[in-house]
């Protein structure tokens, strides 16, 4: 089975790598996977008389606070994490209070090795851990009741925040707290039988919805502290450039400007409001040294990528004789695909608030990597990490952008220089031009066929910058970035000979993890190429895939269901269907796109998707995540690309980096396979397959094979 | 200058070119309108000026003299409740950042058209970007709110 690949990879190699990498910022990081109780010590507000572990706090008044240790960026962890705890604790979700977790070792994501929200891991990592946290808190409350009543604990049950005994005795959790708080949490607890679940798998209202609808939810950009000032930061036109000469006279002359501060990343203007800070910034006269990336342009980037692709790369997977088998094949099919740089473009632009006082630094903002923020800031402003505290707000979109530490460090440096709390707000243009971009990628695909046209060998060679080599260098060993092979190494098709080869090539552009990471890159190449083989050998694309998936019933099942639902072979007149399937994040999915051709190019009418992600914790939000992923993949794949000229990003705002709008949304039909398998990931699963399915439909409709994205510019 | 925000008088003495968005957010602590693009391209900052939807990121506060600024907190009670209840019932928000702006555009639509067709909903909402892609739920919520407010 391939679905645990990320876990295997990350739990083994990368986890240590992340820790090493983060410790590179600071020289020290508390390593260790603490028991849940340890987290209680880190919780600032833990009360004297309470039952507490890292995820649960029951106070003497019976108030239940559940800790959300993952960043809420739309994917619903603010509800799904508490659902896991509440199910076992025996409290209704409507009665709990949610608090965002601080940065602490107990909250490390065991699948990623840091306190990180990413990699579609939140539910998978929490699945057993958080249910056990709920169950252990419940068990001391039960033990306290049983002791008081002099009855066996086994005769007690819990519901709605109460312990009950068959004799009719009952006690609220709050009334038991004093006694329970003196008891030791058990090391082992039994978890509920799935048939007894009342929260997991049920339709529950998202806990954050009312606040978001009433305008009360606090995002990073909404933070306000007493005495706070606002900063707008001028950064070099080319990422990595530095200000060499600054004339701030005109900026300082702007009414309301409080000061001008230079930090390593640029020159900031400080004011009481953003408009004044930005106006002051626009009046700065800065001479920039644009640094080593100053000469970059797309022609050179693509040419260098192609040159790099000539060399040998790391073999990420080899089955049978690998690519050597292609030389012996009766015939050969080759194709080349390319995907562009992309910006994350979260609707909430990058921002962060920092305050330094009493020897402590408090960072409040939209943060996806709390430990990175803590240790990165500590190193940057030369404070001990234990004096840096991370407060995570709601995120107005994340997609990987808010894993990066640049903005937290900038805010901390500004707060240090100004001596007051500072909220740094980037403009949309700053955000677009100073992102960590999804890597450009070149995919050279070769298939060797026998004389009957059956696939005997596949060779996939990807040449691309490695995000991991930049962000977590120790994880990349012998030219192997495990995250670059997502979507290729875990190929579900069985072929006698297979080689997955990756060439890491640094284009000079700063790259970052972007929702679904390499799955979206590789899936476009792999699923387009499989389709090309089917068409070249005159096979039905679904039948050929089914034949290569005979060993993998879960993959076959989603493909069968999706094609049935979409009416494979029965496309309406003037329309065509295209298909794609894969496994990623432990989840199997298949997508069918229905497309017609208009004078303005292809129009996507419908996207049908069937998903097998094992047990679903929060069904309505599982659906929301799939819809969201599909539309992000669609929006970006159809229209968006980031390009460079003279080292600078050419796009600046939503007029030249368009966002999907309501009128462009196709009909979406998502179905989940009922399953009792452990949960798979979902936050990114929707992204990768929509574009290859569309490109395959375009090929079926028009004969035109689109091998480069964005599709609308290359069709 | 004197401003009317959600029916209350507020004072602003800064640069009259300051966009309404930043007067609301930085001076009056009304943070429900969001900053997304600064160029009237995304709609996250949508508020009403005398009942009409505007992009507050690109409208100077001088334009609000003598007019009423309305944010999601100040919508007429029946319409506001119908919209917010519909948004909750349809579980629209994901990250939620754009949603107050979406609701303000929907409120403007429903205050002039009590029973919009799906085409009219799309036309009225097309200027509001949702990067999470909650569009189909927004459409359902607008229809639901229209029925409830009627």
Image (cartoon, helix red, strand yellow):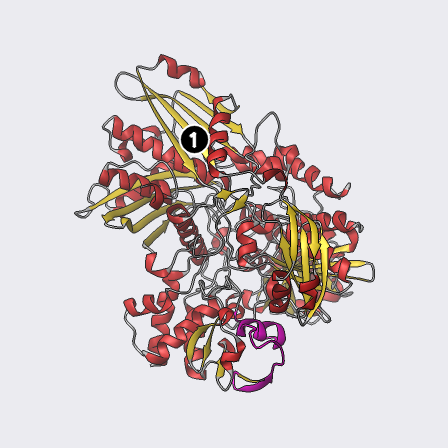
Callout 1: few (<14), some (14-19), or many (20+) C-alpha neighbours within 10 Å?
many
Q: Is residue B21 above or below residue B42?
A: below
Is residue A270 at least partly visible in the picture?
Answer: yes
Question: Which of these two is toward me, B143 or B26?
Answer: B26
The verdict on residue B27 being magenta is yes
- In percent of width and height, residue A187 lies at 69, 47
Which residue is pictured at 66% across the width and 33% down the height?
A474
Quick check: A271 above or below A29? below
B102, A465: nearer the viewer: A465
Q: Quadrant of the C terminus of chain A?
A: top left
Residue reaching furthest to the left = A573
Number of numbered discs present? 1
- Say which of A565 and A316 sits in front: A316
Label 1 secondary element: strand
Residue A523 is situated, as x and y percent measured from the top left of the image, at 41, 37
Occupied quadrant, residue A16: top right
Q: Relative to A58, is A564 on the left or the right?
A: left
Q: Position of residue A235 (x, y in %)?
A: 63, 52
Give the quadrant of residue A151: bottom right
Residue A102 visible, this angle: no
Compare residues A187 and A96 and report the one nearer the observer.
Answer: A96
Please report the bounds of the magenta region as a residue range. B5-33
Indicate whether A329 appears above or below A279: above
Kindly identify which residue carries mark 1: A443
The subunit carrying tag 1 is A
Residue A77 horizontal/vertical position (percent):
55, 56
In the image, residue B80 lies in the stretch drawn in magenta: no
């Amino acid at each position: 089975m391939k679905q645990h690949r990320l876990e295997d990879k990350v739990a083994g190699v990368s986890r240590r790598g992340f820790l090493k990498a983060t410790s590179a910022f600071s020289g020290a990081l508390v390593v260790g996977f603490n028991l849940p109780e340890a987290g209680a010590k880190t919780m600032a507000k833990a009360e004297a008389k309470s039952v507490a572990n890292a995820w649960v706090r029951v106070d003497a008044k019976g108030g239940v606070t559940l800790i959300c240790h993952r960043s809420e960026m739309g994917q619903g962890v603010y509800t799904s994490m508490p659902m896991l705890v509440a199910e076992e604790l025996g409290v209704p979700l409507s009665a709990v209070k949610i608090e965002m977790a601080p940065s602490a070792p107990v909250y490390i994501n065991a699948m990623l090795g840091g306190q990180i929200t990413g990699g579609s891991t939140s539910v998978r990592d929490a699945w057993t851990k958080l249910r056990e946290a709920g169950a252990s808190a419940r068990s001391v409350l039960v033990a306290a009741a049983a002791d008081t009543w002099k009855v066996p604990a086994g005769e007690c049950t819990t519901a709605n925040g109460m312990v009950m005994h068959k004799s009719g005795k009952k006690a609220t959790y709050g009334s038991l707290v004093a006694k329970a708080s003196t008891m030791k949490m058990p090391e082992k607890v039994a978890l509920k039988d799935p048939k007894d679940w009342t929260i997991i798998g049920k339709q529950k209202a998202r806990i954050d919805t009312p606040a978001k609808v009433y305008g009360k939810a606090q995002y990073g950009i909404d933070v306000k502290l007493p005495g706070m000032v606002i900063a707008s930061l001028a950064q070099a036109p080319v990422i990595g450039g530095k200000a060499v000469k600054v004339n701030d006279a005109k900026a300082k002359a702007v009414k309301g400007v409080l000061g001008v501060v230079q930090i390593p990343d640029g020159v900031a203007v400080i004011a009481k409001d953003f408009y004044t800070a930005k106006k002051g910034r626009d009046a700065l006269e800065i001479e920039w040294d644009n640094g080593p990336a100053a000469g970059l342009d797309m022609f050179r980037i693509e040419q260098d990528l192609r040159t790099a692709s000539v060399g040998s790369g790391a073999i990420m997977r080899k089955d049978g004789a690998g690519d050597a088998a292609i030389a012996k094949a009766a015939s050969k099919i080759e194709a080349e695909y390319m995907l562009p740089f992309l910006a994350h473009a979260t609707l909430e632009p990058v921002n962060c608030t920092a305050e330094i006082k009493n020897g402590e630094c408090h960072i409040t903002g939209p943060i996806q990597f709390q430990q990175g923020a803590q240790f990165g800031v500590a190193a940057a402003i030369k404070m001990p990490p234990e004096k840096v505290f991370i407060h995570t707000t709601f995120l107005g979109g994340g997609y990987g952008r808010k894993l990066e530490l640049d903005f937290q460090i900038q805010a901390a440096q500004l707060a240090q220089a100004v001596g007051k709390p500072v909220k740094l707000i980037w403009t949309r243009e700053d955000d677009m031009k100073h992102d960590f971009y999804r890597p450009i990628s070149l995919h050279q695909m070769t298939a060797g066929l026998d004389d009957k046209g059956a696939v005997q060998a596949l060779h996939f060679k990807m040449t691309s910058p490695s995000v991991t080599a930049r962000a977590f260098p120790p994880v990349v060993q012998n030219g192997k970035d495990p995250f670059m092979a997502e979507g290729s190494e875990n190929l579900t098709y069985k072929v006698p000979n297979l080689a997955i080869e990756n060439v890491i090539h640094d284009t000079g552009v700063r790259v970052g993890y972007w929702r679904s990471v390499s799955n979206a890159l590789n899936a476009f190449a792999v699923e387009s190429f499989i389709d090309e083989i089917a068409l070249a050998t005159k096979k039905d694309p679904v039948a050929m895939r089914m034949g290569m998936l005979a060993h993998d019933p879960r993959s076959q099942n989603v493909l069968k269901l999706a094609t049935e639902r979409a009416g494979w072979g029965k496309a309406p007149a003037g329309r065509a269907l295209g298909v794609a399937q894969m496994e990623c994040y432990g989840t199997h999915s298949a997508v069918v796109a229905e497309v017609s051709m208009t004078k303005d190019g292809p129009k996507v009418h419908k996207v049908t998707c069937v998903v097998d992600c094992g047990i679903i914790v929060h069904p309505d939000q599982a659906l929301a995540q799939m819809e969201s992923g599909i539309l992000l993949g669609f929006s970006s794949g159809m229209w968006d690309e980031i390009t460079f000229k003279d080292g600078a990003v050419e796009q600046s705002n939503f007029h030249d980096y368009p966002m999907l709008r309501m009128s462009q949304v196709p009909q979406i039909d998502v179905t989940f396979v009922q399953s009792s398998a452990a949960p798979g990931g979902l936050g990114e699963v929707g992204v990768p397959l929509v574009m290859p399915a569309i490109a395959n439909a375009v090929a079926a409709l028009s004969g035109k094979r689109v091998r480069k994205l964005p599709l609308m510019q290359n069709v | 200058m004197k401003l009317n925000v959600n029916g209350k008088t507020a004072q602003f003495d800064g640069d009259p070119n300051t966009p309404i968005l930043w007067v609301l957010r930085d001076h009056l602590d009304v943070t429900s309108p969001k900053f997304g693009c600064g160029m009237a391209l995304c709609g996250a900052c949508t508020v009403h000026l005398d009942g009409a939807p505007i992009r507050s990121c690109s409208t100077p506060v001088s334009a609000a003299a003598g007019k009423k600024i309305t944010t999601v907190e100040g919508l007429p009670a029946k319409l506001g409740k119908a919209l917010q209840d519909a948004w909750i019932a349809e579980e629209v928000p994901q990250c939620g950042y754009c949603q107050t702006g979406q609701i303000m555009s929907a409120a403007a639509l429903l205050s002039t058209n009590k029973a919009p067709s799906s085409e009219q909903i799309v036309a009225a909402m097309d200027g509001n970007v949702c990067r999470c892609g909650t569009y189909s739920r927004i459409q359902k919520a607008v229809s639901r709110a229209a029925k409830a407010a009627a």
